[in-house]
Amino acid sequence: QPVLTQPPSLSGAQGQRVTISCTGSSSNIGAGYGVQWYQQLPGTAPKLLISGDNDRPSGVPDRFSASKSGTSASLAISGLQAEDEADYYCQSYDSGLSGSLFGGGTKLTVL
Amino acid sequence: QVQLVQSGGEVKKPGASVKVSCKASGYNFMNYGITWVRQAPGQGLEWMGWIGPNNGETNYADTVQGRVTMTTDTSTSTAYMELRSLRSDDTAFYYCARDKGLGGPLYFDSWGQGTLVTVSS
């Protein structure tokens, strides 16, 4: 069964830069499908953070950036702020599933 | 502004069905699909399926295929998700989201507030 693998948790100090990885396979990220990133603050619905590999919707700070290489993608957050403490999910399309797929999520703690 | 407003929480017994609605406003409903995502308490996001805006084309995840039906009412810009033969592990928040994909799921740029469905005897 295709999966997108993320580290379950990550932490960083305020002002620091952190990177969240998302490892897929040849049927999703490696096939060239776009990778999206979503932020879910506690008790709220997810919010689109990055689409189409590295496009930020209006209102998303440029502290958030993403990249993709081969079968993996990553989300970088620079100048960490307390308000960035949230769960982060990657998402892509999978040709084997003929449907969409989320990573397991990464809980980011800001120290 | 784009808004997706979902129906209220539901409590159902195992074996029953639930139908969640999602009313869209602030954009042309016919120019976007709708994706449904669920999240069990304390767990991650699970994509359930997608419905296109025009001819009702659907794409369901294997995990719910056969138990789920997604529909739209274009006259009221409302999407519906019905899940049948409910089990305790269907207890989750159910979210609708506006999907940029017109021919299949792509990505989800605006989300409803979520509907908690609790399955308990």
Image: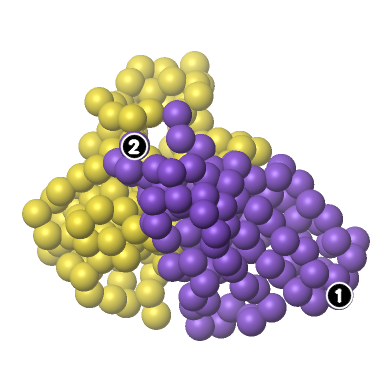
Badge 1 amino acid: Gly
User: Pointer 2 indicates a residue of which chain?
Assistant: A
Residue A12 appears left or right of A54:
right
Provide residue B5's location: percent of width, then percent of height: 39, 61
Between residue B61 and residue A53, name the one nearer to us: A53
For the point 49% across and 75% down, which residue is it?
A55
Of all chains in the rendering, the one displayed in purple is: A
Q: Amino acid at mark 2?
A: Gly
Task: Provide the secondary structure element on which disc 1 rests.
Answer: loop
Residue under the point 52% across and 72% down? A54
Measure how far apart labels 2 and 1 are at the Cα level. 40 Å
Disc 2 target residue: A96
- The vertical placement of B4 against A105, above or below, is below
Image vertical order of residue A70 relative to residue A24, above or below: below
As drawn, which residue projects farthest toward the left? B55
- Which numbered mark, 2 or 1, is in the foreground of this view? 2
Q: Which residue is mark 1?
A: A15
